[in-house]
């Protein structure tokens, strides 16, 4: 599923795929996906095939040569008029969240064929676009950033914190570059504790980035996973979803939907982006308590989150976090 704010009115887009392997052939059936949207969230069949190839490579051999021959083993079934095979003149501009959802649906389905190689959902991608005219230089500018979040937990490994997942292939812009190029100041940039989905292997953490706008500008957000958070797999828990807040903590505080175009920013306005974490992998109560303790020490998981999500009770003794073994055993039902 992918958030549908600003695309149609009140329902999410559904990406559903059935995967069937017969001999050396594999079929991906997308005929049960949602109908095409009025807003620009549709994707075309070439992007669907690219998502399939990406998934097959990641689950088999990441070093395999990338060429059109990879598609010879894969068949796709697409329904005309759907979000993955729209009729002209369907808009396509905000396609990235739908591609992410397609990748995650394929990985989820393929995890039943490639035993142990599933993973929790990632944070998808989000971009912010700020446009205006600099009073210092007199020139127009466009500040464009691609922002990630947490990646999903997978067998044997936790997800990565504050990273771009799947096909985003982008890096988070350094604070120094943003502040030297644009009339913007970044006053907070930090990981969000408890944002990764709980699991035997924890989802990666999303991050918070808070900007002060120094000149009047227009703001656009292209995002997803605010209302529908990244999901976990193999009994793993979902991550915390994303959020965009204008002037947080003031009387004029406003929370924008995951897609919003041309918001008028005034000089001195603050906007805070909180990106989603990654979904968890496996039963959270199967996570080694020592790893949970390490997460608490690192600030990735709060003491309350450790008890609530992992059944691990920690307490601070002589300035150091320790596991309460009796309380943990009782909470975990052991």
Image (cartoon, rainbow, N blue to C red):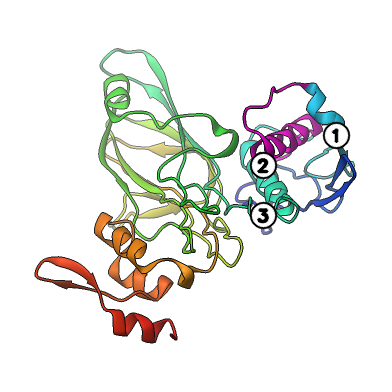
Q: Is residue 204 in view from this perspective?
A: yes
Range of magenta residues: 40-67
The dot on residue 124 is: none
- At which x and y percent is residue 184? 29, 30
The dot on residue 59 is: 2
Q: Nearer the viewer, residue 32 or 279?
A: 279
Residue 291 lies, with reference to residue 209, above or below; the image says below
The answer to whether mark 3 and mark 2 are in CB contact below 8 A is no
- At which x and y percent is residue 240? 46, 59
Badge nearest the viewer, 3 or 2: 2
- At which x and y percent is residue 8? 69, 50
Residue at image coords 56%, 48%: 224
Mark 1 falls on what kind of element? helix
CA distance for labels 3 and 2: 22 Å
Residue 307 lies, with reference to residue 168, above or below; the image says below
Residue 168 lies, with reference to residue 113, above or below; the image says above
- Quickly name the residue at label 3: 1
Q: Quadrant of residue 72?
A: top right
- Quickly name the residue at label 1: 73
Q: In the figure, is residue 295 to the left or right of 147?
A: left
């Amino acid at each position: 599923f992918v958030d549908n704010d600003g695309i149609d009115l009140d329902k999410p887009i559904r990406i559903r795929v059935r995967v069937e392997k017969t001999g050396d052939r594999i079929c991906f059936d997308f005929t049960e996906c949602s109908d095409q949207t009025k807003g620009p969230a549709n994707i075309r069949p070439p992007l669907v095939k690219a998502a399939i190839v990406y998934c097959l490579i990641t689950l088999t051999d990441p070093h395999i040569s990338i060429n059109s021959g990879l598609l010879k083993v894969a068949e796709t079934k697409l329904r005309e008029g759907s979000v993955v095979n729209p009729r002209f003149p369907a808009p396509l501009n905000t396609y990235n969240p739908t591609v992410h959802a397609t990748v995650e649906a394929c990985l989820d389905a393929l995890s039943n064929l490639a035993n142990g190689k599933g993973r929790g959902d990632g944070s998808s991608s989000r971009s912010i676009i700020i446009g205006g005219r600099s009073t210092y230089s007199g020139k127009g500018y466009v500040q464009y950033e691609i922002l990630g979040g947490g990646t999903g937990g997978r067998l044997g490994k936790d997800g990565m914190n504050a990273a771009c997942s799947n096909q985003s292939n982008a890096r988070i812009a350094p604070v120094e570059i943003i502040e030297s190029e644009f009339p913007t100041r970044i006053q907070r940039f930090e990981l969000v504790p408890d944002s990764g989905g709980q699991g035997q292997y924890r989802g990666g953490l999303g991050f918070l980035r808070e900007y002060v706008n120094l000149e009047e500008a227009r703001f656009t957000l292209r995002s997803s996973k605010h209302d529908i958070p990244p999901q976990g797999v193999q009994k793993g828990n979902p991550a915390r979803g994303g959020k965009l807040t204008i002037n947080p903590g003031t009387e004029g505080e406003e929370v924008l939907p995951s897609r919003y175009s041309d918001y008028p920013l005034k000089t001195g306005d603050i906007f805070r982006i909180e990106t989603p974490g990654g979904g968890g992998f496996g039963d959270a109560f199967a996570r080694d308590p020592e790893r949970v303790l390490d997460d608490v020490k690192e600030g990735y998981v709060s003491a309350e989150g450790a008890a609530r999500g992992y059944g691990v009770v920690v307490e601070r003794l002589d300035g150091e976090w320790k596991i309460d073994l009796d309380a943990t055993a009782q909470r975990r039902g052991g």
